[in-house]
Image (spheres, helix red, strand yellow):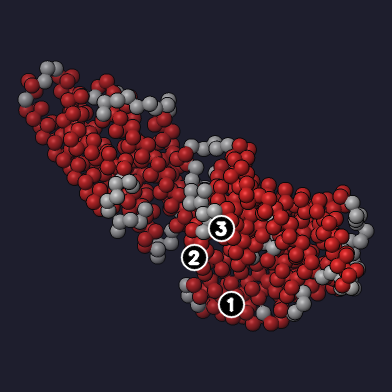
């Protein structure tokens, strides 16, 4: 048999496996994505629960990359604390071993590619004729069938080309040899952008006799490390939170892989003794068990110390962006609902910061503001506006569309409120104390409600009505005061005093209006009002 007769089916088999995994993962995420996301957010309260959630979701989606990419988005959005995310990425590493069990325990023993062929046809029909979630189910079914078709093609090509691809010439028996073969597994996993595909290739090669047990074990370790590189590439240019999550994933798999290399002689000794005692040659299942074993060893070592590990990663990657922008990561734009939650958090933080400065000005105090603060805030709001604008919410999703529009309105009012607050801060000496005192009956309660609405225990509409009512009363009061002042200018000593008082009243009126509109749009942006 020629090289081409083996090589072409081998490449085709790997390609079919990768396409099948991609369709299976995308179909499952699209079909039950929101439920999977809810599980990931809700069941991560402790390191062990986070570990279990990551393992189960990855086993279901057959892709640790899909789990980690989603997780990176959640951490960037602030939905999952970084400490809990560590448990999820460790669980994703364990869930990734499920593919090895499926391949070794089922696909290499039963010709599933024949029995799953109808699923490809059914899935294609669902894609062509179905609507909504039926098309997503069709993608999942087609992916499932193509995955096993690829495994069947891969197994056949490996069996026929075992002599051509025999790696027996590679060194064995030493630590250096283990590292060399491990690097082959890492390169294979990196090139395929899938550790599952690399492990499936390794298992079929072992089953065909192209590699021995020792080489197969080292390649599995390399594949487990290589899968982390995809996550690293995704976080280029991303937020610090995303980079920390990816780094923790890389460090866990790298350290665990090193532990596996060290423990490999023990593993090989146990397997050899079992062969002597039982007289049964090891199958690909042994490699799948080894993969699960060393990941579990790593999990048992890391999980009790997740907080210490988190602090180490935080020291290695200190935060660089401002708090206002730390939740905004372009990777979130593929998940419109999560992206909206991220932008909402940033909006609320900016609003609270500006409201706090405004409150100090109303109380005739001098706010402690660093140089360039208001310019930085303006830039942050412009970046936030760009992020929300690029969030491609489906037109049919009326609720998310309304939230997106409300957030854009909130940014608009915050930009203008920031300018008015900056103007007042830079001209504190020109603000008229009498005008501030005149409206304090309404302006101080309004800003207090705006700052503490999440803690006041009232329904959303109630506190908004109070803020709106205070804004209307300030408008009426300032309008009457300005009219009275212009009618009786003799009541004020100088023209400069008249101008100072009228300008202060105008600033109070417009600022109170922006406070009301910002709070209103923040409530709409959160989806709490309709």
Q: Which mark is residue 123?
A: 1
Depth check, mark 1 against mark 3: the one in front is 3
Can you identify the residue that label 2 sits on? 35
Q: Nearer the viewer, mark 2 or mark 3?
A: 3
Query: 474 left or right of 299?
Result: left
- Which one is closest to the eye, mark 2 or mark 1? 2
Local crowd at mark 2 within 10 Å, few (<14), some, or many (≥20)? Answer: few
Q: Position of residue 390 (x, y in %)?
A: 46, 51
Instruction: Say above or below: 218 vs 10.
Output: above
Image coordinates for residue 324, horizontal then vertical, percent: 45, 40
Identity of the residue drawn at 68% across and 66% down: 98
Residue 395 screen position, x and y as percent: 40, 62
Looking at the picture, does residue 141 appear above or below residue 257?
Answer: below
Q: Are marks 2 and 3 in contact (CB under 8 Å)?
A: no
Disc 3 target residue: 49
Query: Is tag 2's residue or tag 1's residue first in the polypeptide sequence?
Result: 2
């Amino acid at each position: 048999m020629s090289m081409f007769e083996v090589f072409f089916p081998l490449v085709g088999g790997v390609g079919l496996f990768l396409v099948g995994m991609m369709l299976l993962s995308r179909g499952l995420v699209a079909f039950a994505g929101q439920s999977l996301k809810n599980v990931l957010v809700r069941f991560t309260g402790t390191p062990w629960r986070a570990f279990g959630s990551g393992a189960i979701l990855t086993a279901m989606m057959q892709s640790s990359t899909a789990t980690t990419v989603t997780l990176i988005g959640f951490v960037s959005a602030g939905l999952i604390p970084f400490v809990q995310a560590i448990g999820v990425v460790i669980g994703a590493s364990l869930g990734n071993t499920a593919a090895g069990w499926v391949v070794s325990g089922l696909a290499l023993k039963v010709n599933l590619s024949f029995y799953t062929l109808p699923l490809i046809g059914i899935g294609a029909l669902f894609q062509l004729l179905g609507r909504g979630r039926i098309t997503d189910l069709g993608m999942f079914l087609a992916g499932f069938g193509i995955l096993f078709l690829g495994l069947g093609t891969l197994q056949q090509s490996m069996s026929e080309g075992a002599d051509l691809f025999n790696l027996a010439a590679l060194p064995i028996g030493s630590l250096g040899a283990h590292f060399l073969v491990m690097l082959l597994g890492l390169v294979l996993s990196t090139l395929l952008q899938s550790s599952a595909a690399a492990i499936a290739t390794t298992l079929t090669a072992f089953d065909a006799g192209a590699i021995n047990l020792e080489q197969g074990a080292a390649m599995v370790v390399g594949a487990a490390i290589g899968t982390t590189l995809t996550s690293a590439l995704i976080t280029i240019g991303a937020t610090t939170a995303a980079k920390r999550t990816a780094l923790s994933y890389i460090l866990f798999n790298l350290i665990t892989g090193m532990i596996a290399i060290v423990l490999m002689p023990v593993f090989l000794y146990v397997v050899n003794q079992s062969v002597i005692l039982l007289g049964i040659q090891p199958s690909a299942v042994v490699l799948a068990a080894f993969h699960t074993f060393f990941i579990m060893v790593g999990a048992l070592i890391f999980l009790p110390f997740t907080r210490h590990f988190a602090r180490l990663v935080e020291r290695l990657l200190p935060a660089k962006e401002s708090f206002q922008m730390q939740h905004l990561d372009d990777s979130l734009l593929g998940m419109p609902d999560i992206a909206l939650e991220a932008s909402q958090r940033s909006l609320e933080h900016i609003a609270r910061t500006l409201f706090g400065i405004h409150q100090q000005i109303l109380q005739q105090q001098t706010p402690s503001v660093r140089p360039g603060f208001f310019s930085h805030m303006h830039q942050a709001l412009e970046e936030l506006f760009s992020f929300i604008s690029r969030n491609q919410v489906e037109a049919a999703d009326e609720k998310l569309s309304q939230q997106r529009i409300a957030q854009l309105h909130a940014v608009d009012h915050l930009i203008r409120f920031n300018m008015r607050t900056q103007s007042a801060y830079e001209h504190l000496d020109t603000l008229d104390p009498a005008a501030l005192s005149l409206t304090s009956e309404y302006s101080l309660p309004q800003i207090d409600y705006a700052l503490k609405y999440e803690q006041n225990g009232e329904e959303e509409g109630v506190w908004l009505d109070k803020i709106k009512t205070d804004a209307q009363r300030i408008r009426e009061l300032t309008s009457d005061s300005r009219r009275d002042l212009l009618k009786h200018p003799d009541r004020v000593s100088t023209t400069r005093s008249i101008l100072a008082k009228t300008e202060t009243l105008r600033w109070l009126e417009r600022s109170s209006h922006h406070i009301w509109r910002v709070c209103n749009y923040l409530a709409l942006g959160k989806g709490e009002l309709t």
